[in-house]
Image (spheres, rainbow, N blue to C red):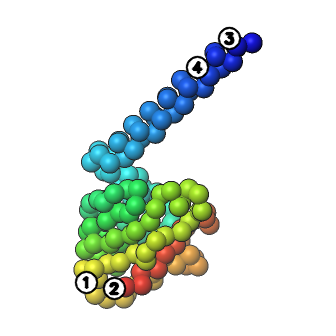
Amino acid sequence: MIRIFRRSLQVIALVGTIMVGIVAVALIVSQTPWFRDWLRRYVVRESKQYLNGELSIGHLGGNLLFGVDLSDVAVDVSGERVVAVKTVEVGYSIFDLISKGMTRKTAPTAPRWLKQLPRKRASPFNPNEKSSSRFSSKRCFCASVSTL
């Protein structure tokens, strides 16, 4: 009986050690430039489902556990730039996102001036537009920029 109990504790300790190691490696890898570039490309690729235009992000920085800094963010519709922002900062806690759901600590801020662009076309975020073949009704996290 003691032998089975001892063996069970060894297996639990081994599995726990492996899990801690996997989490540690994931946290370390998520802070590398390679992962940030992959994440930036992934976000740009996935945005095609939700936008009528093309999103471009120049650089993704910051600590991915508590907030991100995006620079040179732009949205082009039919080859025409409709939104251009030098930097966007979003603060959040990954632990709160996992435990409490979609919440954010601070509103996204754009400390650099948003470029004034002429309004000739419909918004790239308009889900009711008839010609929107790329809009998806999938659940998404939408946030408004409150301080520009």
Locate residue 133: give its quadrant: bottom right
**Residue name at image x 43 percent, y 77 percent:** 107
Q: CA distance from mark 3 to mark 4?
A: 11 Å
> How packed is label 4: few (under 14 Cα within 10 Å), some, or many (20 or more)?
few
Mark sitting on residue 137? none
Q: CA distance from mark 1 to mark 2?
A: 7 Å
Query: Would you name the residue on which mark 4 appears?
Result: 10
Residue 137: % across, % down:
62, 66
Q: CA distance from mark 3 to mark 1?
A: 69 Å
User: Mark 2 belongs to which amino acid?
Assistant: Leu
Q: Residue furthest front?
A: 2
**SS label for mark 2:** loop
Q: Nearer the viewer, mark 3 or mark 2?
A: 3
Query: Would you name the residue on which mark 2 appears?
Result: 148
Q: Nearer the viewer, mark 1 or mark 4?
A: 4
Q: Which quadrant, please, contains the C terminus?
A: bottom left
**SS label for mark 1:** loop
Dot placed on the residue nearer the N-terminal end, 1 or 4:
4
Q: Are marks 1 and 2 in contact (CB under 8 Å)?
A: yes
**Residue name at image x 60 percent, y 26 percent:** 12
Q: Are marks 1 and 4 in contact (CB under 8 Å)?
A: no
Dot placed on the residue nearer the N-terminal end, 4 or 2:
4
Dot placed on the residue nearer the N-terminal end, 3 or 2:
3
> How packed is label 2: few (under 14 Cα within 10 Å), some, or many (20 or more)?
few
Most foreground residue, 93 or 71: 93
User: Mark 1 belongs to which amino acid?
Assistant: Trp
> How packed is label 3: few (under 14 Cα within 10 Å), some, or many (20 or more)?
few
Mark sitting on residue 3? 3
Residue 64: % across, % down:
38, 56
Mark sitting on residue 113? 1
